[in-house]
Each structure stands twice: as structure tokens, then as C-alpha cells.
Image (tube, rainbow, N blue to C red):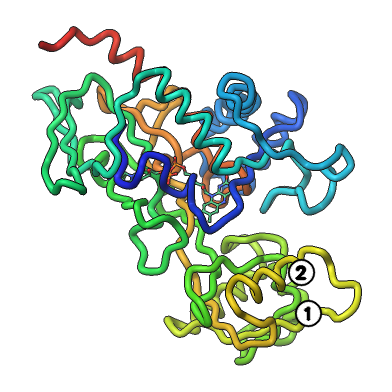
Amino acid sequence: MASAGKTMSGSSFFPGTWGLGLIGPVSEDDEQDLIDTIQTVGGGVADPELVQTFVHGIPQAIKWLEQDLGVELQRPQSAESAQQKQFIPCFDHKTRMWRGLTRKPLEDALTTRIESLGIRLLPRHELIDLVEDTDGKIVGATLYDRTNERLVPMAVKATIIAAGGTGGLFERSLTSADVLSSSQAIALAHGASLTNIEFMQMMPGFIEPKRNLVFNEKTWRYVKFDQPVDNADDKLDDLLEQRSGYGPFTSRLDSRAIDLAIDQAGAEGLALHYDFPREDVPEFVQTFATWLQDEHGIAPTDEMRVAMYAHAANGGIKIDMTAYTGVEGLYACGEATGGMHGADRIGGLSSANGIVFGRIAGASAALAAQKEPETA
Ligand SMILES: Cc1cc2nc3c(=O)[nH]c(=O)nc-3n(C[C@H](O)[C@H](O)[C@H](O)COP(=O)(O)OP(=O)(O)OC[C@H]3O[C@@H](n4cnc5c(N)ncnc54)[C@H](O)[C@@H]3O)c2cc1C
């Protein structure tokens, strides 16, 4: 298992956040609603078969994480709190089953499983290219050992690309530096296709006084702009209220005007500051303001500048329900792939995607490898 960064890296282990939200259907009865909602939020360009496999696979994948791997997942504090508005996933219309995936329990459980299976790890080894035989089947990989600065050729019986999304292609990006975003092009060059690749999550983030900080979307309603916002001035409060409901840009809602204004402000970012309420301050505002002040030395009244950052990819390498790319010997999963989300993605479904299709890709590739003759 080769990875450009350390073994547990990429967005899945991004240190700048508490962990990852993971959502799924509340019950079997909720599956169809989640499937339909993915199609709506996805603008009708998600692959129906993939969506079906995806949603149906989430409860089993969570069970596997908890029961087989022993990963302790976070849950809402009570059945009542699970119904609270704050647990409605981004772009969704109702609460779902919610779990929190934090780095340490995941890393510990995966390390134990990797050791017990005797998997050979190649950290800091970057996939440079794949090798085809004369029939176009993938039979090898060329890795670059970033520590020793040398090329490492490998013969392979089956290959899985799980190298993350396309955020690394952008100058301003809220992903880990080791999300190189090269694997989609490598797969494409060897006969795979890409789907929904134009759909990315673009996320407002701070560039001043500090860069690479995600803008907390729930705080949009307390923002005062320090410069005019085109096409939005007369209904700004309503647009800010709507924009407080989700993180990444969407073109589906009127509050896109806010994101377009940020984009128009260019590389210097849009100037704004907060005007938080003085009484009955909601808990999350308090927590956020304290974090901003204590961790980053930023006071709410300071002038801040916000710009758009590339965040997570919604499209990528096209796969089928078995995570097969259509190129013999080549499988793919996780944020490197597309088709299970469509244009916009419901929050908490990217982590779920990695786990559901990661397991499927592993099983499919193992089966394919077993059918291959032993090489000398
Ligand atoms: C700040 C932040 C918050 C997020 N919050 C959520 C959330 O709450 N819920 C949710 O569902 N999603 C969330 N996401 C998205 C989610 O984290 C990712 O979509 C998901 O973790 C991707 O998992 P992955 O295994 O496909 O890829 P990654 O975890 O990105 O892993 C990619 C791996 O591939 C390696 N790699 C890259 N290129 C190469 C190469 N050429 N050769 C070899 N190795 C390579 C990298 O080193 C890395 O190990 C968030 C993302 C970020 C950045």
C-alpha cells in the first residue's frame, strides 16, 4: 500500500479539523429518501446504480468499522439531540444517522488491522504511472520513493487507486498537501474515464489575518461587509441567513450571490468583520469566537478577508458498482472517484463513500488478483 504522504494521510487525516462527519440512512425506510435526495442535490447527474449501492452499503460499512475494526465512532448525545437542526447534513432536508469519525481511534484500529494482515506499507511513495500489457491490462505501477529520490517499479495483479480528490490542483486549497490530484489523469491516460469531474466543492476560507482556515458557515448571518456586495445589497440579510445553512458554494440557491461576491473580490479576498450578538449568544458562536481568538489571535471585530478555496471533489474516476474502472486490473474508490454524488454533495457522504466503495474495491481487486497466475 503506497501513499504519497505518510500511511494515514490525505483529507481523511487532515489535522485542521476535529474529524469527519459521516452520515447514512436512519433505517431501511430512509434509504429511498436518501437516494432521492442525493439525486436532487446532485442535480440529476449522479449514477442511479452507484447511488443505490452506496446508500445501501453505508449501514454495513459502519457496522464493519465499529464491530470488526473496533473504531469508536462519535454519536449525537441523545435521540432528541440527533433530531436537532444542527445534525441536518449540509444540503439535506432532514436528519440522518450521524456518526463522527475522529483520527486517533481510526488510526489505531487501522494500524492493528494492517499489522494483522501483514500488509507491506510504502509511505512517501508516489504513483507516477501505471504499466499496461499489450492488451491494455494494468500489470505494473511506477512509484517514486520521495525519501530516497528513486523510482520503484512494481509488478501488480490488481491495482486500486484511492488517492483522494482534485483539490491539490488549485492554488488555494483546503486539503492536505499530499493530495496530489495526479491519479485521475494517470487513470485517464490508461483508458479509464472521468465523470462529474467539473463538480468541486469550493469553500470560503480566510486569507487574512491568517490563511487556510475554513470559514464557519453558521456565522455568515453575523457578517458585516466592509465593501459593497454586487446584486445583493437590498436583500443581504436574507441571503446571509440562507448562506449560513451550508459550507461549500452551490449554484442552486440564491445565496450564491455571496460566493460570487467573494470570487469577484479576487486574490485579495472580500473584506468583512463579525457583529456577534451581545446577549443570548448561541453556543456555537461562543465556541467559534473563543477558538478564533485563542488559537489564532483573531478578534471578531478585526477586518478579515475571505476568498474561495478548492475543498473536496464531487467527481472523479468513473467506476461501476464493483469499483471497477472498465480497465482490466484497475479499480478505484473514495474521493478519487465520482458518480455517487453528482453536482452537489450532501455533507458526510464523502467519508461514507471512501468506506463503502473502499471495501468493495478491496474485495473486487482481491478477487481479480486471485485469478491471476503466480508470477515468478
Ligand atoms: C477540512 C476537511 C473537512 C472535511 N470534512 C468532511 C466531513 O465532515 N464529512 C465528509 O464526508 N467529508 C469531509 N471531508 C472530505 C473527506 O475528508 C474526504 O473526501 C475523504 O476523507 C477522502 O478520503 P480518500 O481516502 O478518498 O482520500 P484522502 O484521505 O485524501 O487520501 C488520499 C491518499 O492518497 C495519497 N496520494 C495522493 N496522490 C497520490 C499519488 N499520486 N501516489 C500515491 N499516493 C497518493 C495521499 O498521500 C493520501 O494518503 C473533509 C475534507 C477536509 C479537507
The picture places residue 215, in percent across and down from the top left corner, at 60, 69
**Badge 1 local density, few (<14 within 10 Å), some, or many (20+)?**
some
The disc at residue 285 is 2
Q: Kindly tell me whether residue 195 is visible in this rendering.
A: no
- Point 19% across, 43% down: residue: 145
What SS does tag 2 mark? helix
What SS does tag 1 mark? loop
Q: Quadrant of the C terminus?
A: top left
The picture places residue 48, in percent across and down from the top left corner, at 55, 32
Do callouts 1 and 2 mark residues in contact (Cβ within 8 Å)?
yes
- Point 29% across, 26% down: residue: 120
In this view, the residue farthest toward the bottom is 227
Report how far apart the C-alphas of labels 1 and 2 lie in the structure. Answer: 8 Å
What residue type is disc 2 on?
Val
Left or right: 59 in relation to 95: left
What residue type is disc 1 on?
Phe
Residue 76 sits above or below residue 72 on the image: below
For label 1, being within 8 Å of ligand 1 is answered no
- Point 50% across, 71% down: residue: 308
Mark 1 = which residue? 276
